[in-house]
Image: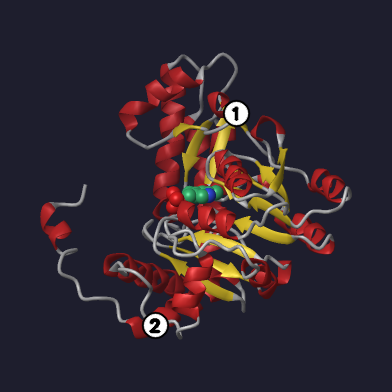
Amino acid sequence: MIPALAAAALLDIPPFPPSRMAELADRLAAILNTKNDVLIVQGEAILALEAVATSLPRRGMRALNIVTSPYGDWFGRWLCRAGAEVTDLRASGGQPIEAPAVEAELAKGGYDLVALVHAESSSGILNPLEPIARAAGAAGALVIVDAVASVGGHELDVDALGIDIAVIGAQKSLGGSAGLSALSVSPAAWERLLAPGAPELSSLSLLDLKHNWLDKGRGALPGMPSALELHALDAALDRVEREGLAAVIARHARAAEATRAGLVALGLTAFVSPDRASNLTTAAVPPPGIGIGNLLSALAPFDTGIGPGIGEAAERLVRLNHTSPRAALQPVLTGVLAVGQALASLGCSVDLGAAAAVILSHYDGRAR
Ligand SMILES: *Cc1c(COP(=O)(O)O)cnc(C)c1O
């Protein structure tokens, strides 16, 4: 909890200078490796995702919606609500989607857009974005990516991959606040968005954002700009730029590798192979005979925030979060050792020393 005195400092803060709004968008564009327009949305990332799924479809537009978590499921429903003909392509058992399954569906022809989540924080998986984006582009479909949980944790090269819309938030690997989000929009995506029938006069309207912000020279955000959130985004970007985006990504990769190795040393089984694993969270299956409920109860006193997976495979998985400040030696070590101690209390024979040693070996004398 933030002490009352510190929280009071969040009151009466100066407005964020409208002249610096464009600069924020440009810094986000640099993180996304894109020359496309970047829009800032005053709302958490789920709102930006709903805005995309509401603003883009026109009646009869055909969407291939890849579902690997509840986020993808919601995206498909919003597309449907906006009049699209949606085909949901679901990976089984909470696993990542495989590119050939997407290619086979695209080969049937006629898709106007392909939507997917890049990395899933709910199950610790990483979808193979590159081959899917290329296949979708080759099929003439727009590529829409929920990169909320991958930006800052994985490489994300929007222009090189031909991603038409990428939605991001600052609150995962970028270590910022959750109240603002952003999206990049390619010229091809604008063409679709600007077609007759776009929603207007709505918080979900990307056309409104274009007319009231982009077309007016990117000054003050329309509506009531949240100074608190804009200053927080500025500070988060400062911190990322100081560390360097590549170093932030490497830090998340290291945390993921160390966590996985530590859990395996304790006798858990990683849910997915390393090349399909998210760098933000790691999900693993407990040793045989250990139920998730019992494990989580035994973990509760350690106050590590370790929880179950979310979605299809949830009841089988324990999930460790190593995002942002947690992508560092101490939280990784604490989390894995807490799992080890909880397993020991349930009667498993575990080697805590081996788990600690393998984590330390990944850090090789560093703290982060
Ligand atoms: C966290 C997350 C979101 C939603 O972000 P909020 O800011 O919580 O609305 C969307 N998609 C994915 C993949 C996420 O991990």
Q: Three-letter amino acid code at disc 1? A: Ala
Q: Is residue 330 above or below residue 9?
A: above
Residue for point 59% across, 33% down: 264
Identify which residue, 260 or 137, lies in the foreground.
137
Calculate the distance from the C-alpha at mark 1 to the C-alpha at mark 2.
Answer: 45 Å
Label 2 near ligand 1 (CB < 8 Å): no
Which percent across, then down, holds residue 150? 56, 56
Label 2: how many Cα within 10 Å (few below 14, some 14–19, many 20+): some
The residue singled out by tag 2 in the image is 219
Q: Nearer the viewer, residue 259 or 150?
A: 150
Quick one: SS at disc 1?
Answer: loop
- Give the labeled residue for mark 1: 313
Tell me if 306 is positioned left or right of 249 in this view.
left
Which residue type does callout 2 highlight?
Gly
Does residue 19 appear in the picture of this structure? yes
Q: Position of residue 235 (x, y in %)?
A: 34, 70
Residue 147 percent coordinates (x, y): 57, 57
Q: Mark 1 or 2, which is nearer the eye?
A: 2
